[in-house]
Amino acid sequence: MEPVRAALDALATRLWDERRLLLLLLYRLTVARLLLSADERRFVSDALHEVDQTLEQLRTEELRRDQAVRDLAAEWQVAPDTLSLPEIARRSPPPYDHTFTDHLGAFQQLANEIELISKENRVLATATMQDVSDTISQITGPPEHVPATYDASGRLGSAAAVGNRLREAL
């Protein structure tokens, strides 16, 4: 196999691997959204841990893809930073041109979906945090100003009654 085709094959493989990881990221973000929507707080941290693991795998795969682009750039004798995915698709012979064009469309679609679900997750997480804050306020009472200093007797002022409702309930 000639070196250019080998470099194109290697890059196409790296892009397939990256697409699979992006799809896995989308799946894991969807799971997190469903857990947030269902108010299953006890599982959210596990879901977010899986998202973090997938992001770490993506970072590793991006480094591999970057090396594959550098290898292709060396074969084409161009600077690696001039090789965007549309440029690679434009320069590539058939069937690689179609392969890279397909990757480009898939990456754009996945990026849009990941951005949308990430926004939805932020909205749900913010609402969940507000619910938690409201629940804590119901248990402990509304947040009150806590003085930064002690009074002459060495005690905090009356505003330090945080948690009185909880103590009263106990």
Image (cartoon, helix red, strand yellow):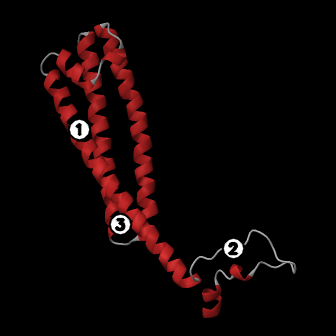
Q: Are marks 2 and 3 in contact (CB under 8 Å)?
A: no
Q: Is residue 132 left or right of residue 58?
A: right
Q: Residue at x 13, y 26 (%)?
A: 98
Residue at the extreme bottom of the image, as rendered: 169
Looking at the rendered image, the disc whose residue lies closer to the viewer, 1 or 2, is: 2
| Label number found at residue 146 | 2
Circle nearer the N terminus (1, 3): 3
Rate crowding at label 1 as few (under 14), some (14 to 19) or many (20 or more) other CA atoms within 10 Å: few
Q: Amino acid at mark 1?
A: Gln
Query: Looking at the image, can residue 170 be seen?
Result: no
Report x, y in % for residue 10.
Answer: 29, 23
Q: Residue at x 32, y 42 (%)?
A: 21
Reading the image, the residue beneath label 1 is 108
Report x, y in % for residue 166.
Answer: 61, 87
Looking at the rendered image, the disc whose residue lies closer to the viewer, 1 or 3, is: 1
Question: In which quadrant of the rendered view does residue 38 lie?
Answer: bottom left
Q: Residue at x 65, y 87 (%)?
A: 164
Asked which secondary structure carries label 2, the reply is loop
Q: Is residue 111 left or right of residue 139?
A: left
Q: Amino acid at mark 3?
A: Leu
| Label number found at residue 143 | none
Report x, y in % for residue 130.
Answer: 45, 70
Q: Amino acid at mark 2?
A: Val
Rate crowding at label 2 as few (under 14), some (14 to 19) or many (20 or more) other CA atoms within 10 Å: few
Q: Nearer the viewer, residue 125 or 60?
A: 125
Reading the image, the residue beneath label 3 is 35
Circle nearer the N terminus (2, 3): 3
Q: Nearer the viewer, residue 134 or 95?
A: 134
